[in-house]
Image: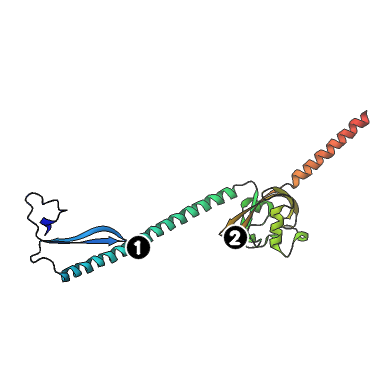
Amino acid sequence: EPAGESRSGGHPEAYPPMHSSIGLPLLLQGKVIGLIGLADRPGGYQAGMVAALEEIAGLGVVIGDAYLKDLAQARLREEREAAEINLRKNEFQHRQIINSSLDAVVTMDENCTIIGWNRQAESVFKWTASEVIGQSLTDTIAPPRMRVRNTAGLVGQLQSGESNGPGQPIQMPAVCKDGKEITTEMAIVRMDMDGKPTFTAFIRDITERLVREKNERRNQRLESLGTLAGG
């Protein structure tokens, strides 16, 4: 009898008296999200009716769980799509930066296979990206005398720069598509992607600079000899 329930707050004004009631909570993931409530049925509510209402409440829980799972999957798809869009955007921006670099930028995987080749690399080495992507570095820009069977060893040599640390510029000879050999300055940076090492070489052709510096030193020596000879 609801009227005799100590927790009852009473009936609103003009509300008919309540002689019997039943309430079953709706649970979703252990939390109460609603209530199935019936009241004032003549004769009250027997055990069979309570069991039937419990089945209805249980069905609501099943439907609610399925809805939450679908909602979670939809949110996961949205987050994945948003992440893919951001990734493509970042990749596009990265390519734009690499292609606008004044240095030749060559990226290799752990097997020394070329996976990145920017426009400046095309200009320096005369190979197009489509010609070298998927090829070994040792078969493209490494001079024949420096080609080794263990390409991973060459990557280690490039990365270490012998006595220099990773990312420090080193001088390395390189060969172009037409067979012309040049002297390059390289800075090798290692980045791990999906647990695999990737090496990016920032390469600059310094052949002309070295010739110019050599000529300047020779001229300076000649000037010094001329000064000494002139007394």
Say which quadrant the N terminus sits in: bottom left
Q: How many marks?
A: 2
Disc marking residue 196: 2
Name the amino acid type tagged 2: Lys
Q: Residue furthest top?
A: 231
Determine the residue positioned at 40% across, 59% down.
76
Please name the residue that numbered disc 1 is placed on.
Answer: 69
Label 1, secondary structure: give it: helix
Determine the residue positioned at 19% across, 67% down.
53
Instruction: State which tag comes first along the sequence, 2 or 1.
Output: 1
Say which quadrant the C terminus sits in: top right
Give the x, y percent position of residue 78: 40, 57
Q: Residue furthest bottom?
A: 48
Label 2, secondary structure: give it: strand
Q: Is residue 6 left or right of residue 156?
A: left
Q: Is residue 38 left or right of residue 101?
A: left
Name the amino acid type tagged 1: Lys
Find residue 215 and report its image quarter: top right
